[in-house]
Amino acid sequence: MDRLQQLAVFRRVVETGNITRAARDLGMSQPSVSRHVAELEQRLGVPLLIRSPQGLTPTEAGTAFHVEAVRILDALEEAEASARNGVRALAGTIRIACSAAFFNRVVMRWVPEFLAANPEVTLDARLDDRQVDLVEEGIDLAIRIGPIRQQSLIARRIGRVDFGLFAAPAYAGRRPLPETPEQLTEHEFCILLVGPQPETLLLEGPAGRTVSVPMHSRFRATNIEAVRVAVEAGLGIGLLAPWGVADQVAAGSLLRVLPDWRAEPRDVHLVWPGPRILPRRVRAFVDLLVERAAAEPRLQVR
């Protein structure tokens, strides 16, 4: 029990970055929290936390140990829920990483159903367009659009998305919109900064014709919503998902550029760290996402 309490205390200290806040959350005294952490470090023989005026941050060993501590404590919580409510009961926290735009417009429609069916499960959504390190940040599951380059991840494809070119009337008023892909070389782009940045854009057109054009950009952002806002402001042409900007197109604040052409469709994957076995609550959420995605028209290339 002392070892489990040490795990719980260490987990809360890492997540709050502060002994005082951890003690308050756990209903313990500050000296007790400090003692548990010190005893844990002494037993393991390695420093787990770096102490500075800014707070507490885990060392490399502390980061790895925190991931495993979370896994152990969540498994215990799930086992207790199964004992209380039946073998199939799920409990614990699912930590998912996804871009805010995709999560809010697609995934969020399926979340209430899952949480209603599993009242002891908590969903912690880390919404960021950057590709976070799943192990380092303790993420159970991520949804990624585009190629998966990390061989250490297990990936399951759930669909594909289209991307098209869009511009604002203000941009079109300053310079005529291109009528051919080749004319894109004369235009400015608003670009999403995620992963390796290609210097060219591959477009697919009528009869399977493909064209590669260079992209010149004066605005780049790590968030797709920021790119959309920049395009609406007339800063350039943007590569956006048509279903993600349907309201703006209907309102006239965005115009489709080269409507017969689209960017190469990108696969959507669920990914998780390998080779670990997924907890049952995460596996159940994966199964729901796979089932719902199969019937989601926005994840099918048209």
Image: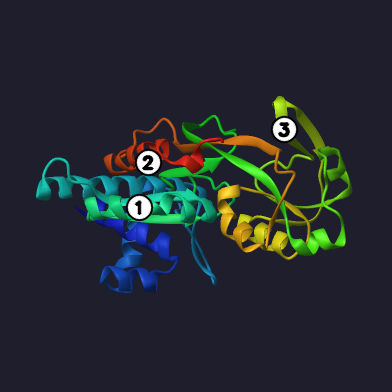
Q: Which residue is mark 1?
A: 111
Residue 160, position as x, y percentages in the image: 54, 36
- Measured in 3D between alpha carbons, the distance from the residue under mark 2 to the one under mark 3, in whole angstroms, is 30 Å
Q: Quadrant of residue 54?
A: bottom right
Name the residue rendered at 76%, 62% in the picture. 169
Q: Is residue 161 visible?
A: yes
The residue mark sitting in front, 1 or 3, is 3
Q: Is 165 on the left-hand or right-hand side of 225? A: right
Q: Is residue 159 placed above or below 36 in the rendered structure?
A: above
Q: Is residue 138 placed above or below 299 in the rendered structure?
A: below
Query: Which label sits on residue 292?
Result: 2
Q: Which residue is mark 3?
A: 205
Q: Quadrant of residue 223?
A: bottom right
Secondary structure beneath dot 2 equals helix
For label 2, count other residues whose C-alpha is less than 10 Å away and answer few (under 14), some (14-19) or many (20+): some
Q: Is residue 43 visible?
A: no
Instruction: Looking at the image, tell me whether mark 2 or mark 1 is earlier in sequence order.
Output: 1
What amino acid type should be assigned to the residue bearing mark 2?
Arg
What amino acid type should be assigned to the residue bearing mark 3?
Gly
Q: Is 55 on the left-hand or right-hand side of 169? A: left
Residue 156, position as x, y percentages in the image: 45, 32
For label 1, count other residues whose C-alpha is less than 10 Å away and answer few (under 14), some (14-19) or many (20+): some
Instruction: Looking at the image, tell me whether mark 1 or mark 3 is earlier in sequence order.
Output: 1
Residue 17, position as x, y percentages in the image: 45, 65
Q: Is residue 229 placed above or below 246 in the rendered structure?
A: below
- Measured in 3D between alpha carbons, the distance from the residue under mark 2 to the one under mark 1, in whole angstroms, is 11 Å
What amino acid type should be assigned to the residue bearing mark 1?
Val
Q: Nearer the viewer, residue 6 or 245?
A: 245
